[in-house]
Amino acid sequence: MKIVILTKNESSYTSSRLAEEAKNRGADVFIINPQEVCCTSAGEIFFRGESIGDVDIALLRTPPFREEKEYFHHVGRLLEMRGVRVINSPSAVEIAGDKFRTSLTLQKAEVPVLPSMLVRKREDLASAVEYAGGFPVFLKTLQGTRGIGTIFCPCMETLRAGAETLWAYYSNIMVERFAQDSPGETLRVLVMNGEVMGAIKNKAEEGFLRSNFSRGGKSSAVNLNDEIKSISVKGVSALGLSLAGVDLVLERGQWKILEINSSPGIKSLESATGENMAGKIASSLFCYSDSNKQIPL
């Protein structure tokens, strides 16, 4: 089996660990930066001047920024056209990369999410706050990872200032309910091919609300109940993803999906749980043994 990992950061922890574990299971693995790829209209793909040849599986680790994302997805779509199983497919990643579109898709699938409103005019901010359930609220750009583009707004003055600043830089924004049951705490659940691989609880640094591991949050192992597992798997399936990290918060006594990351990191999961998450993902790639069993795209 030949696997390519498409990533901007060829030496990242997650990409290196996934490559290591896949190689241990007998795969030929290549880590490729799509920004160094050339594609022909005949469907050929060249990396640093050489054809990448036939590929069985491509792991698409899409960057958050639009210009880079578009080129990554051109490469991903070409691989799909060649019959390669792309995890995750560009079409699914496009949904997951837009917070409001994710919310709409999850609500249609009856997956619990926080109330939010897409807003473009200053005079509509009050209605958005009312819909979200009152202050405090989160102001969010539709794209962004690791907590970037998220502003905590305890009052209208902060909300207006934040919204007008983001609009001035041509960013679309949404106003989302603040989950007061678990301030500064989230669950991160890793899902692969419809199965929960592991989970951690992330807690923000003292005095902060963003719990992301990459933003200084502390991670610890956690056991999940069946409700959380079901919500996580159903949410990932609704977006059409195969591999994803699901962030959940406790809000008014119910667990709700805050965000779904289509390019999840595994460093915090492996560090906090002591489990071989990269090995679990790699094994899942080899889980089919006949031509009728395929990895979902």
Image (cartoon, rainbow, N blue to C red):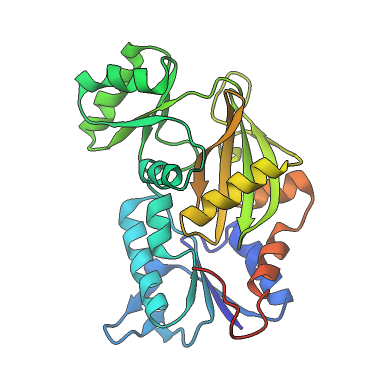
Among the 4 quarters of the image, the one containing residue 16 = bottom right
Residue drawn at point x = 37 percent, y = 55 percent: 94
Farthest residue to the right: give it: 274
| Rendering coords of residue 45 (x, y %) | 38, 81
Q: Give the camera-side residue of 130 and 53.
A: 130
The quadrant of the picture occupied by the N terminus is: bottom right
Residue drawn at point x = 33 percent, y = 84 percent: 43
Compared across the picture, whether 26 is left or right of 244 comes to right
| Rendering coords of residue 199 (x, y %) | 69, 45
Among the 4 quarters of the image, the one containing residue 255 = top right
Q: Give the camera-side residue of 152 and 38.
A: 152
Residue 160 visible within the image:
no
Compared across the picture, whether 90 is left or right of 199 comes to left
Residue drawn at point x = 66 percent, y = 50 percent: 267
| Rendering coords of residue 49 (x, y %) | 39, 83
Q: In the displayed structure, would residue 93 be above or below residue 102? A: below
Q: Give the camera-side residue of 154 and 113.
A: 113
Residue 232 visible within the image:
yes
| Rendering coords of residue 194 (x, y %) | 61, 59
Q: In the displayed structure, would residue 257 be above or below residue 275? A: above
Residue drawn at point x = 33 percent, y = 69 percent: 74
Compared across the picture, whether 201 is left or right of 233 comes to right
